[in-house]
Image (cartoon, helix red, strand yellow):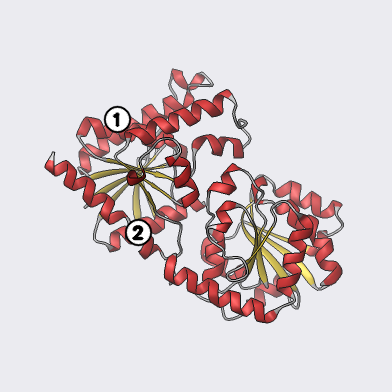
Amino acid sequence: MRILHILDHSAPLHSGYAFRTLSILREQRRHGWQTFQLTSPKQNAGDVERETAEGFEFVRTPYRPGWLAKVPALWPFDEMRATEARLLGFAREVEPDVLHAHSPVLDVLPAIRVGRALGLPVVYEVRALWEDAAVDHGTTTEHSLRYRASRALETHALRRVDAITTICDGMRRDILRRGIGADKVTVIPNAVDIEKFRVLDGADAGLARSLGLDGWEVIGFCGSFYAYEGLDLLIDALPQIVASRPRVKLLLVGGGPQDAALREQARARGVADRVVFTGRVPNDEIDRYYSLASMLAFPRRSMRLTELVTPLKPLEAMAQGRVLIASDVGGHRELIENGRTGLLFEAGDVSALARAALRLLGDAALRDRMATAGRRFVESERTWARSVDRYEAIYSSLVGRRERA
């Protein structure tokens, strides 16, 4: 089986998108499949034609904006033009059995055109919907003209591909509501490398000392600092938590658009000495920071994206035997069984967040039970080997259909 993946971006860039891609590629190679990888102009690779990262060669799409790029509403079509030209040449070179395009829709539309030109089936992996991503980044609002146009373009693509995969049940339900047949959509959930994320035996003492966390109870968060993550709620809850647990500090690992605002908020709330900002850390060191946390917190706000999409970080926490609290948005409810593998609290409610944190910090037996249950859930349901197995039936069906045709 020869699979050509069309991607928005990839390693060596660091993002949840890039990490999921690497996990899929590694498992597909273990299945004995040949994979080829092409990235869109969003990679910002300049004039680089090909690049090796994490043991995989990625074919890049050098981009020289044409006249379409000068028109605000038409720049996506200019990028798709570049992707299509690069993809057509590369597909002719490697002769894949399947084109596998990953979100956003700007990757799948060129794949559809190339697939038709070469007689190749197209799989569309929906990791997020383009119109919702634009809302999350603040470039449009829900129900705006741009939002409706983006949604129509997404639905257009979904109807024209041969098969669809998506990362969770929430996304699958949204796709089906667009009139797509249920037999066309398969959930390939986010997962973890169970060998990489092992149960942590204890805190990294040296790191704890260097961060001023030695001897403290630590509430941690690891990830990107976007507004929808609700980290401002976590800082607002900290005074309530400290009033009952005076030896608590907050550890925020990562960075992003909200970084400066969160630091200013901590100063304004008088808890700057209780919040440790590490900045972004290398992915291969993240377990050291997880080891410091008495518990992890994921206070995502309720919005369309968080209600539909399951995040990856709670799975990583459970895989390492960490206990967690999380807001009760739909994406968390798919992953966390309240009272068994974690504690859920009402999204957007600072007092509910504080109560959940205090309950978990004050009950060692509950933490032990949740740590064990969370790890077992990941081992049985959310390994990459188990998730990637689901591609086999999809690919085989498409290749068989093509051969019969």
Q: What residue is at 58 percent from the left and 75 percent from the top? A: 371
Mark 1 nearby-residue class (10 Å; few <14, some 14–19, many ≥20) = some
Q: Position of residue 38 (x, y in %)?
A: 35, 43
Work out whether 382 lies above or below 147.
Answer: below
Q: CA distance from mark 2 to mark 1?
A: 26 Å
Work out whether 54 lies above or below 87.
Answer: below
User: What residue would you read off at disc 2?
Assistant: 388
Residue 205's disc is none
Mark 1 residue element: helix
Foreground pick, 113 / 150: 150
Foreground pick, 307 / 95: 307
Q: The residue under label 1 is which amino acid type?
A: Arg
Mark 2 residue element: helix
Q: Position of residue 212 (x, y in %)?
A: 75, 71
Q: The residue under label 2 is which amino acid type?
A: Val
User: What residue would you read off at disc 1?
Assistant: 113
Q: State the image quarter where residue 160 is shown.
A: top left
Q: What residue is at 32 percent from the left and 46 percent from the top? A: 183
Q: Position of residue 94 (x, y in %)?
A: 22, 44
Q: Position of residue 89 (x, y in %)?
A: 25, 34
